[in-house]
Image (spheres, rainbow, N blue to C red):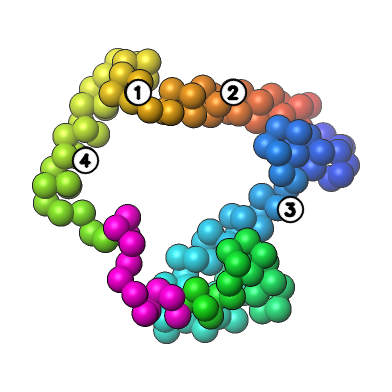
Amino acid sequence: MSHYSTAYLSRIFKAELGINFYEYLTRCRLQHAIADLEDSNRKIADVALKNGFQEVKSFNLMFKRHFGQTPSNYREHLSNGPRSAFKQPLTPTQTAWVQAQMTHWAQLATVDQLSACESCAYKLHFEEYQALKTKVAQLKNLLNQ
């Protein structure tokens, strides 16, 4: 064990990611809760408990703080309107295109050859991801010392 205080580790986390560990954990929990809320048979209390919130009140508070609406309103919104395009199943044409792209990318020797995204922000995001991955590895090494 590294014998670092949780406050110190949280400061490192915030310095590297821009948010503290608790906020990161809350966002992860909410992300999983959103998927669970799509099942209208699940009670909101069960979704809250399943995703690490100790009570429904804190779940509602965090959900509203992050999404501007309660979990009930979110669920109601899902059931009232058509789902957005990114939640619709892919058409056979789209599925074939995705499979062809994945096969092409898998056959490339290195990630640097992924030039299809040079015109978009992919390269920048990939570089940021690599830098973050390096920093997390360094932090992990510090913790294991």
The residue pinned by badge 3 equals: 22
Q: Marks 1 and 2: which is nearer the front?
A: 1
Q: Position of residue 37 (x, y in %)?
A: 47, 73
The reply to whether discs 3 and 2 touch (Cβ–Cβ < 8 Å) is no
Left or right side of 83 for 97? left
Which of the numbered marks, if any, corresponds to residue 98?
Answer: 4
- 143, above or below 46, in the image: above
Q: Mark 4 or mark 1, which has the lower sequence index?
A: 4
Residue at 11% in and 51% down = 92
For label 1, the crowd category at 10 Å Cα-Cα, with few meaning under 14, some 14 to 19 and many 20 or more, is few
- 131, above or below 4, in the image: above
Magenta stretch contains residue 33: no
Give the amino acid type for the residue marked by disc 4 in the picture.
Val
Distance, label 4 to label 1, CA atoms, is: 19 Å
Give the amino acid type for the residue marked by disc 2 in the picture.
Ala
The residue pinned by badge 2 equals: 131
Quarter of the C terminus within the rendering: top right
Q: Nearer the viewer, residue 132 or 19?
A: 19
Q: Position of residue 97 (x, y in %)?
A: 16, 39
Give the amino acid type for the residue marked by disc 3 in the picture.
Tyr
Q: Which residues are magenta?
A: 76-87
In which quadrant of the rendered view does residue 6 lie?
top right
Q: Nearer the viewer, residue 108 or 15?
A: 15
The reply to whether discs 2 and 4 touch (Cβ–Cβ < 8 Å) is no
The residue pinned by badge 1 equals: 119
Q: Marks 3 and 1: which is nearer the front?
A: 1
